Amino acid sequence: MPKVKTNKTLLKKVKLSGSGKLLRSHQLRSGHLRRNKSKQALRRHKVPMVIRGRLEKTLKRMIGK
């Protein structure tokens, strides 16, 4: 059975925490027209989001964990 190659693009977008959770940056809709958005909304987008469920299992397999 050949080894599965690590998806390097995905590695740049997600981070594996110490406890094994997958974290992605929560930057959705935060870059476009930033001046019109409230500062509170922009701060909210800085907080990383935890990926859960079936997607988490798929992504972990893609990064080789």
Image (cartoon, rainbow, N blue to C red):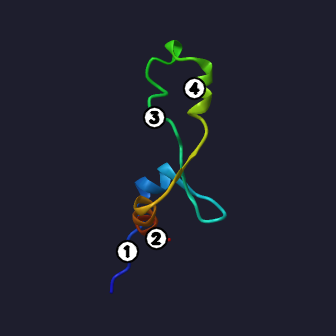
The residue sitting at the top extreme is 36
Few, some or many residues within 10 Å of mark 3 (<14, 14–19, 20+): few
Kindly identify which residue carries mark 3: 28
Residue 29 occupies quadrant: top left
Q: Earlier in the sequence, mark 1 or mark 4?
A: 1
Kindly identify which residue carries mark 2: 64
**Looking at the image, do the residues carrying marks 2 and 1 touch, with CB atoms under 8 Å apart?**
yes
Q: Is residue 23 above or below residue 31?
A: below
Residue 28 occupies quadrant: top left
Q: Earlier in the sequence, mark 2 or mark 4?
A: 4
Of discs 2 and 3, which sits in the foreground? 3
Which mark identifies residue 4?
A: 1
- Marks 2 and 4, Cα distance to the nearest angstrom? 32 Å
Secondary structure under the numbered disc 3 in the rendered image = loop
Q: Is residue 63 above or below residue 48?
A: below
Which mark identifies residue 53?
A: none
